[in-house]
Amino acid sequence: MRPFTYINLAISIDGKLTTADRKLHGFGGPEDRDLMDELRSRADAVMIGAATLREEDPLLWVRKPERLVVRAEQGREPQPWNVIISRSLDLPSLEGSMFFNTPDFRRLVFTGMNHSEERVAEIRKLAEVYCVADVDQGLDLQAVSEKLYQMGARKLLLEGGGTLNFAMLKQGLVDELYLTLCPLIFGGDSATTAVGGAGFAFDQVRQLELLELKHGSNDRIYLRYRCKQV
Ligand SMILES: NC(=O)c1ccc[n+]([C@@H]2O[C@H](COP(=O)([O-])OP(=O)(O)OC[C@H]3O[C@@H](n4cnc5c(N)ncnc54)[C@H](OP(=O)(O)O)[C@@H]3O)[C@@H](O)[C@H]2O)c1
């Protein structure tokens, strides 16, 4: 068993998550940020790839007090668990990182089996660390999902980036996709796209079914898709 898993992303019209210099964040606008907050508030855990952690040092938190009230009424933890996927364990400086030093929420790092006990022990001072086997030159994300389910997570929000999105889609672990399509063109061969990795062969491309389409303010288009399982 694994959690119901949904991706949320803001993308440019040309399908990018960032500009080529990887410096453009928060381009979705206030309505998109509110959707992100709502989607986080429904999640038991929010997961990102280590590159997003290294670049943004984010707190994957619910901000709106009324949503925190609803979580409390439902008997849920105040904040969703924050989950990092990192094969290398090349993480931001443990002393200086906001992610690793903000108290009062559960941090989980999933990594491979090949790290020294010292390195794992160092990270364990600030986060829970789980070591899983590799498949397809990456972590066995099915095992990660099953572990999260065993720990009590029933809804998992995946917030990218493109490398992790691809790996999760490839392993058939995504149920829904929320996309905020922004009227911007970033261009740039090296700009991160919504789904990166090695890509799918044509007979393996993932297919989606449109569940919702909403025209938001500032010419944003909000889309929700169901991922058809292959
Ligand atoms: N616009 C948006 O909504 C949005 C959302 C999220 C992110 N972003 C942006 O996207 C960029 C990052 O995207 P990205 O594609 O470069 O990186 P990413 O997916 O955030 O992270 C990639 C890293 O995650 C780990 N990882 C991913 N899949 C793995 C697997 N199967 N097994 C083991 N480890 C795995 C690896 O970490 P190690 O290298 O540590 O092994 C890998 O290098 C950032 O600039 C971020 O700001 C934008």
Image: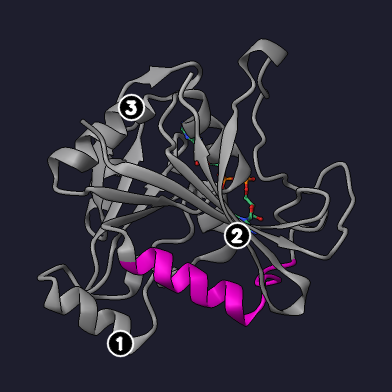
**Residue 205 seen anywhere in this rendered image of the structure:** yes
Label 3 element class: helix
Name the chief secondary structure element in magenta: helix
- Of the 4 image quadrants, the one containing the N terminus is top left
Q: Amino acid at mark 3?
A: Gln
Label 2 element class: helix
Range of residues picked out in magenta: 24-41
Q: How many marks?
A: 3
Task: Work out how far the residue at label 1 is from the one at label 3, CA to CA, in angstroms.
Answer: 33 Å
Q: Amino acid at mark 1?
A: Glu
Q: As drawn, which residue projects farthest toward the left?
A: 75
Residue at the spot of label 1: 66
* Ligand 1 contact, mark 2 (Cβ < 8 Å): yes
Residue toward you, 221 or 134: 221
Task: Work out how far the residue at label 1 is from the one at label 2, CA to CA, in angstroms.
Answer: 29 Å
Q: On the picture, is 75 further left or further right than 89?
A: left
**Quadrant location, ligand no. 1:** top right
Residue at the spot of label 2: 55
Q: Residues within 10 Å of mark 2 (few under 14, many from 20)?
A: few
Q: Does 35 appear in magenta?
A: yes
Q: Residue at x 26, y 81 (%)?
A: 68
The image shows residue 28 at horizontal and vertical percentages of 67, 70
